[in-house]
């Protein structure tokens, strides 16, 4: 992937995020940083990634999350060909999850 997106401002923001120590600090920082729409959009993307990883079909993911199939296709492309961040976090969460837990089961139905 192209490295030109890594501006000094983005690097400074990532540096600040890495310094957050608690869930409460993280929630308050992101709530101040992002609009409710931005938070919703990011959480929807994360829900889509988890459901893609669980093997659900695009139509079912769309039904559960409200994301369009075009959005799901873009997210799938990043999951499979992006920077590797989605995969790294999915793998970390899977390693920490209790036996028998799955992303599809944890995702609420809409």
Image (cartoon, helix red, strand yellow):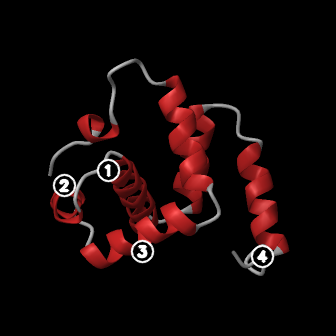
Query: Cβ–Cβ below 8 Å for labels 3 and 1?
Result: no
Q: How much space separates mark 3 and mark 1, taking CA atoms?
A: 14 Å
Q: 22 or 102, which is in the foreground?
A: 102
Q: Which residue is mark 1?
A: 51
Q: Which residue is the site of mark 3?
A: 74
Q: Residue 65: horizontal and vertical position, in percent?
A: 24, 58
Q: Residue at x 54, y 39 (%)?
A: 91
In the shown orientation, is residue 76 left or right of residue 28? left
Residue 77, placed above or below residue 12: below
Q: Is the residue under label 2 in contact with that under label 1 (CB below 8 Å)?
A: yes
Counting other residues with Cα less than 10 Å from the Cα at mark 3, is it few (<14), some (14-19), or many (20 or more)?
Answer: few
Asked if disc 1 and disc 4 are in contact, CB closer than 8 Å, the reply is no
Q: Residue at x 40, y 55 (%)?
A: 49
Spatial CA distance of label 4 from label 3 is 19 Å
Residue 9's spot in the image, x, y percent? 79, 71
Secondary structure found at label 2:
helix
Q: Label 4 belongs to which residue?
A: 3
Q: Quadrant of the N terminus?
A: bottom right
Residue 88 x, y percent position in the rendering: 60, 46
Who comes first in sequence, dot 1 or dot 2? 1
Q: CA distance from mark 2 to mark 4?
A: 33 Å
**Mark 4 or mark 1, which is nearer the start of the sequence?**
4
- Farthest top residue? 99
- Report the residue at 57% width, 56% height from top: 32
Q: Earlier in the sequence, mark 3 or mark 2?
A: 2
The image position of residue 64, as x and y in percent, is 19, 55
How far apart in space, not on screen, are marks 1 and 4 (Cα)? 28 Å
Q: Earlier in the sequence, mark 4 or mark 3?
A: 4
């Amino acid at each position: 992937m192209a490295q030109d997106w890594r501006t000094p401002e983005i690097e400074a923001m990532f540096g600040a995020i890495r310094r957050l120590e608690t869930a409460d600090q993280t929630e308050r920082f992101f709530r101040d940083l992002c609009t409710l729409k931005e938070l919703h959009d990011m959480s929807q993307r994360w829900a889509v990634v988890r459901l893609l990883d669980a093997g659900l079909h695009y139509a079912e993911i769309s039904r559960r999350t409200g994301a369009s199939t075009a959005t799901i296709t873009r997210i799938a492309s990043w999951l499979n060909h992006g920077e590797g961040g989605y995969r790294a976090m999915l793998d970390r969460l899977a390693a920490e999850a209790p036996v028998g837990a799955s992303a599809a089961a944890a995702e609420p139905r809409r």
